[in-house]
Amino acid sequence: MPAAFRIFPQEHLIVVHYHGYVKAQEYAAMIEAGAAHADFRADQKLLIDLSGMEDFERDYPALLAIQARVLAISSPSAHETIAVFLAPHKIAMEGAQLVLRSWKDLNVPLRYSMVHDLGEAGDLLGIEAQKLAQMRDETVAEAR
């Protein structure tokens, strides 16, 4: 699967890394796997790393169905979740924008942003960039 995730409970953070060609079903599988993990909490911060994504399936109806599941998973939280998309290149930005547009009209307890580097992501997540880079690198290593 062109994705991996790792939960860092001490940082209250989930790091997700996508690489290669990403299909909607793989996005859905990653959400389900994360939600089923023993350390998952609905209000954990998210870093969605799209830096390794080369392309993605543009299936908007499937994406909307997946986002309904995201809403169901995140609804139990009384707190807003911070989701940061790391999108350092054109394809990554297109993928992030597609997901962000799909959340636009939903009542989702998410505050989401798209950034171009880990420094910006760290600022939004409240985690030092060097530490965030280390956590991202550990997640990327699991993807291989």
Image: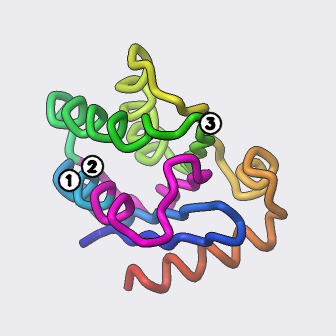
N-term-proximal mark, 3 vs 1 = 1
Above/below status of 15 relative to 91: below
Whole-percent x and y of residue 138?
A: 57, 82
Question: What secondary structure is marked by label 3?
Answer: loop
Mark 3 or mark 1, whichever is nearer to me: 3
Dot in front, 1 or 2: 1
Q: Amino acid at mark 3?
A: His
| Residue 61 part of the magenta segment | no
Q: Which residue is mark 1?
A: 23
The residue lying at 64 percent from left, 75 percent from top is 135
Residue 20 percent across, percent down from the top left = 31, 65
Which of marks 2 and 3 precedes in the sequence?
2
Q: Which residue is mark 3?
A: 79
Assess whether residue 55 is covered by the magenta stretch. yes
| Number of residue marks | 3
Residue at image point 16% right, 36% down: 62
Distance, label 1 to label 2, CA atoms, is 6 Å
Comparing 62 with 90, the one in front is 62
Q: Give the colouring mode of the picture.
A: rainbow
**Residue occupied by mark 2:** 56
- Point out the frontmost of discs 3 and 2: 3
Q: Which disc is residue 64 wearing? A: none
Q: Secondary structure at mark 1?
A: loop
Span highlighted in magenta in the image = 31-56
Position in image of residue 12 (x %, y %): 66, 61
State yes or no: discs 1 and 2 in contact (Cβ < 8 Å): yes
**Quick one: label 1, few (<14), some, or many (20+) residues within 10 Å?**
some
In terms of depth relative to the viewer, which is nearer, 73 or 20?
73
Amino acid type shown at disc 1: Lys
- Separation of marks 3 and 2 at Cα, in angstroms: 30 Å
For residue 81, which quarter of the picture?
top right
